Amino acid sequence: QVQLVESGGGLVQPGGSLRLSCAASGGTFSSYTVGWFRQAPGKEREFVAAITSTTGSAIAADSVKGRFTISRDNAKSTMYLQMNSLKPENTAVYYCAAGRIRTYYATNQGYYDYWGQGGQVTVSS
């Protein structure tokens, strides 16, 4: 059983940056595709970014490309989401997730087996 613990959320002004971290325990982290999803108030949870276990390829939603960067450190069993040039519409609860998923399915939350507790990111002046 894999456990994921998130940290790094908070309040930031528009244009600012935040880095979310997600530490994994209880499994072979390097064998999992890992991803970030978010849920804004009144909206469904949506895909943000993922990074695969096999090739280390990164995938990102069009809305965050060029501003958000996903990365992983297998030696530390930790994944990150660096968020730059934040906008008020990026306000949401952000969730990390992990699963043994082929690249083709990495944007689909239904294929992820393990989830973090969620962290609030608020972008406001």
Image: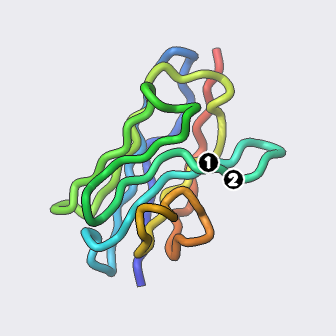
Q: Label 1: state its secondary structure.
A: strand
Please, which residue is most extreme toward the front here?
Answer: 104
| Coordinates of residue 101 in the picture (x, y in percent) | 44, 71
Q: Looking at the image, which residue sits at the far left?
A: 75
Q: Amino acid at mark 2?
A: Arg
Residue 122 position, x and y percent, is 62, 32
Label disc, if present, on residue 38 of the rendered structure: 1
Q: Which amino acid, by three-letter code, is at mark 1?
A: Arg
Above or below residue 3? Residue 59 is above
Say which element carries label 2: loop
Res 69 quadrant in image: top left
Seen in the picture, residue 125 relative to 101 is either above or below; the reply is above
Q: Position of residue 11 (x, y in %)?
A: 56, 29
Instruction: Determine the residue positioned at 60% across, 63% down.
Output: 109
Residue 37 vs residue 33: left or right? right
Q: Is residue 115 left or right of residue 1?
A: right
* Front one among 64 and 89: 64
Which image quarter holds the C terminus? top right
- Residue placed at 29% from the left, 70% from the top? 29
Q: Which mark is residue 45?
A: 2
Residues under numbered marks 1 and 2 in contact, where contact means CB atoms less than 8 Å apart: yes
